[in-house]
Image: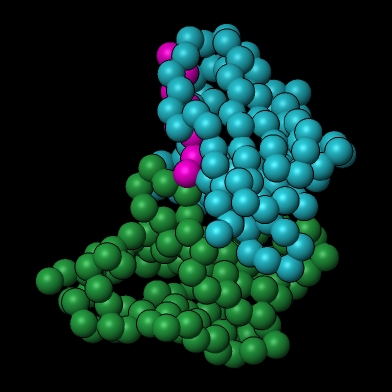
Amino acid sequence: DQQVKQNSPSLSVQEGRISILNCDYTNSMFDYFLWYKKYPAEGPTFLISISSIKDKNEDGRFTVFLNKSAKHLSLHIVPSQPGDSAVYFCAASVSGTASKLTFGTGTRLQVTL
Amino acid sequence: GAVVSQHPSWVICKSGTSVKIECRSLDFQATTMFWYRQFPKQSLMLMATSNEGSKATYEQGVEKDKFLINHASLTLSTLTVTSAHPEDSSFYICSARVTGRPQHFGDGTRLSIL
């Protein structure tokens, strides 16, 4: 039972344009969401997070949007840069569970010149 | 800040041997450490959660006698894969966190059992 889903396994975007990565979840108990970036043979690097009391959080080029009614979140990267090419995982947790994370399957982003 | 070191990064060993993987938080004291496993092209799957000085909490389907976790201090947790077999070959990643902060991950250990 995949509680966090990233339906696009890959995405290709031109440098300078916007990258939009999507994530859907099924567990309505999730109340904290995170995005991680991962390069091959490395551990995930934390990018940005959002609590369920918000619908938007912004940090530099990265913005995360949360639509609780649709159980959907998205990560916007603008402008996209070649160094953003990596696998992006969304993750979700439930308060009071020692922040156990449930990860999505990942989306491989390729930013082309 | 928030550096997590994992060692070794790559292990190849014979079937039947035991392998120990270390996870250290280098610049902070971690209240909780987590161990994940990732198969190729799949998501990270949580194996267990460990708090310093207490027994690890294992996820459903993870054999605690197979995957021994020791969390001896606020900066060190170890995962021992006992009597490893080829099906245990995978990418193992640890993470550490302080209450109220996101998890920070190590760079993972690629384990190959021949």
Q: Residue at x 27, y 65 (%)?
A: A83
Prevalent SS, magenta region:
strand
Classify A102 as above or below B77. Answer: below
Determine whether, in the image, residue A40 is placed left or right of residue B64: left
Return the residue nearer the eye: A93 or A81.
A81
Classify A79 as above or below B45. Answer: below
Determine whether, in the image, residue A22 is placed left or right of residue B23: left
The magenta stretch spans residue B113: yes
Q: Residue at x 70, y 42 (%)?
A: B75
Colour scheme shown: by chain
Q: Residue at x 61, y 32 (%)?
A: B22
Determine whether, in the image, residue A12 is placed left or right of residue B64: left
Return the residue nearer the eye: A69 or A53.
A53
Classify A6 as above or below A77. Answer: above
Q: Residue at x 57, y 75 (%)?
A: A49
Q: Position of residue A10 (x, y in %)?
A: 31, 63
- Rendering quarter of residue A112: bottom left
Q: Position of residue A63 (x, y in %)?
A: 46, 84
Which residues lie in the magenta part?
Answer: B107-114
Using the rendered image of the protein, determine whether residue B91 is visible from the camera's viewpoint: yes
Determine whether, in the image, residue A51 is placed left or right of residue B109: right
Return the residue nearer the eye: A21 or B79.
B79
- Rendering quarter of residue A94: bottom right
Q: Quadrant of the C terminus of chain A?
A: bottom left
Q: Position of residue A88 (x, y in %)?
A: 42, 63
Rendering colour (chain A): green
The chain shown in cyan is which?
B
Q: Quadrant of the N terminus of chain A?
A: bottom right
Q: Position of residue A97 (x, y in %)?
A: 79, 60
Toward the left, the furthest residue is A113
The magenta stretch spans residue B2: no
